[in-house]
Amino acid sequence: MMNQPSQLEFGSIVGERYRIIRTLGSGGMSRVFMAEDLKLPGKHWAVKESIADPKIMKIVRTEAEMLISLSHPRLPRIVDFFEYPPSGAVYLVMDYIEGITLEAYMRGYQGCIPQEQIIPFALQVLDVLDYLHTRQLPVIYRDLKPANIMLTPEMEFKLIDFGIARSYKSELDQDTIKLGTVGFAAPEQYGTGQTDARSDLYSLGALLLYLSTGGKYSEWTAGVEAYIRGELPRHLIPIIRKLLRHHPEERFQSAEEVVGELRRSANFQSAQPGKSVSNASSDYAGTRVVAVLGVSSGSGATHTAIAVSHYLARKTHSVALVELHSTAKAFARLQEVVEGIPVGQASSSRRFEVDGVHYWRQTSRADVISLLGGSYRFIVLDLGNGQDNERLEEFLRADYPLVVGSGAEWRVQDITGLARSLQRHPQHKWNYCLPLAPSGAVRRLRKELDHDKVFALPFHSDPFERDDEMDQVLDELFRGVITDTRKRRFRFLKQQH
């Protein structure tokens, strides 16, 4: 509730034109009313009443003039401004927007709005932030939160409260007034610096995290990964993480930059059927996920995942290889060899490194989400074989889903069986890898699956080492995505000797 008593009641007239009908809402600094226009019968407006300190009335007046100059379809038009110095009351008259707040909408969905609405929502908010931030005198909104976003019946988003918006003043080191909603306001709004466009982008990140965790979190704290909704579009996680960086210089620097990243990510995720996802734009800056799933035990999923990881590490940088299986033993044995740990004695650290690839053994889904919020260019998931719910979900959501099956003629049907069992899921992104398969088996499988991304993998005894034939296959699989920058090679087999 507004701390000061209101000067208005039912029937009050503001500016000799606007008659108060009812209260729409109130907060700590203001109250909003619906009013009818006495000069335009049937026209309704929203009238916002605030109590201003007489000492800052000049600032309030300047800010009101700034707000009146704004014109954007996602902002209510502010058409009039009145002030009453004796009481300190000021009134903004603006468009009345029919709909409900995002906060109320979330309550209706028990905190879980449909995940397919999250990215369109983000793009709409970024649209209006870009407009505000790129004006000749940039406007910083400073209070982006669910209660300040209105959803119209057409599901369009509009910002409705400019109570603490301000024009950016480049000569100031800090804001004169520190305001914002706890949990959604950027750290600099609490006195560490002046707010700018990056402060609003932090609030957007907080808002997206809030939506992604069903309203449980708006700050990136320890353990938040476990609450991120499983069906959330994968590429949103590193974007949210970057938006929520503590230091402004570590965040995205403009709304336009975030829009570009969202669109590149979305285009990458929604590659058209019949086209390889490797044809996506090579300037994608987010983390890409490669998921390797074996059709059956002994099909070579772990061997292939290692080979793919070191291929990517030689071509680019920042690669993590994740063993997404709580009972798997392969990475533990490898860590014993690499770090010289006695057999059977587990290391206290689940991460170790081999030639630039960070190996993560026996990792959980929450750990994967945490890694997505980091700086890895590629994350390769070794899913082993099997189709339990957690691992299958990660496979289906990956940017590069790789199915590894036996190349033996009598085992090819294992792959077609897997494809049929999951036919309700889109499979145009899938890539099929058949170790030691003859060319005839590859052709038949391509025809049977009606899918051209079927590859025969050559004999490759040391997956840590570069092999020309294997590189040719992987070049085709990842064609157009990565640049070729060579790295020092790790001669794993030779070290064992």
Image (cartoon, rainbow, N blue to C red):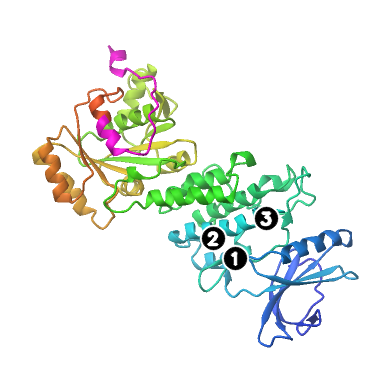
Dividing the image into 4 quarters, which one contains the N terminus? Answer: bottom right
Q: Residue at x 30, y 22 (%)?
A: 465
In this rendering, would 473 be left or right of 95? left
Marks 1 and 3 close (CB-CB < 8 Å): no
Local SS, label 3: loop
Residue 25 or residue 139, whichever sits in front: 139
CA distance separating discs 1 and 3: 15 Å
**Which residues lie in the magenta part?**
472-497
Q: Residues within 10 Å of mark 3 (few under 14, many from 20)?
A: few
Q: Is residue 90 above or below residue 188?
A: below
Residue 287 or residue 347, whichever sits in front: 287
Lower position in the chain sequence, tag 1 or tag 3: 1
Q: Which label is found at residue 124?
A: 2
Local SS, label 2: helix
Lower position in the chain sequence, tag 3 or tag 2: 2
Magenta stretch contains residue 479: yes
Q: Residues within 10 Å of mark 1 (few under 14, many from 20)?
A: some
CA distance separating discs 3 and 2: 18 Å
In this rendering, would 361 be left or right of 472? right
Specify the farthest residue to the left: 410
Tag 1: amino acid = Arg
Tag 2: amino acid = Gln
Q: Is residue 480 visible?
A: yes
Place residue 143 in its image quadrant.
Answer: bottom right
Specify the farthest residue to the front: 136
Which tag is nearer the camera, tag 1 or tag 3?
3
Q: Which residue is mark 3?
A: 135
Residue 133 or residue 449, whichever sits in front: 133
Q: Which label is found at residue 74?
A: 1
Q: Is residue 220 visible?
A: no
CA distance separating discs 1 and 2: 8 Å
